[in-house]
Amino acid sequence: MAILRWLALVPFLLMLAGLVFCNRVTPLVLGMPLLLAWMLFCCLLTSVIMGIIYLADPANRE
């Protein structure tokens, strides 16, 4: 259960890391600046991680 709590911290850390390492405009990813593409990736990854946490939580099993 402790692993699930640490897994929930991953999206937050990725968003902070994006501000430091991906704050550039020149490399375009699908026509978007790198920081915008990074934030979009983080939002999608957050949904996946929260789904994994939901499925692994024993309180949700019936």
Image (tube, rainbow, N blue to C red):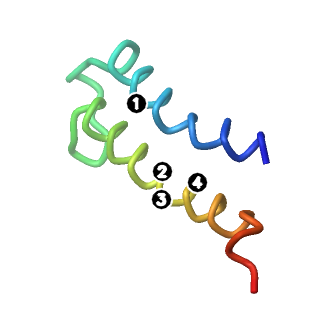
Three-letter code, disc 4: Ile
Cβ–Cβ under 8 Å for marks 2 and 4: yes
Residue 23 numbered mark, or none: none
Cβ–Cβ under 8 Å for marks 3 and 4: yes
Distance Cα–Cα, label 3 vs label 2: 4 Å
Three-letter code, disc 3: Ser
Distance Cα–Cα, label 2 vs label 4: 5 Å
**Residue name at image x 40 percent, y 15 percent:** 21
Question: Which SS class for mark 3?
Answer: helix
Q: Position of residue 41 (x, y in %)?
A: 41, 46
Distance Cα–Cα, label 3 vs label 4: 6 Å
Distance Cα–Cα, label 2 vs label 1: 10 Å
Question: Which SS class for mark 2?
Answer: helix
Name the residue tied to disc 1.
15
Name the residue tied to disc 4.
49
Name the residue tied to disc 3.
47
Q: Quadrant of the C terminus?
A: bottom right
Three-letter code, disc 2: Thr
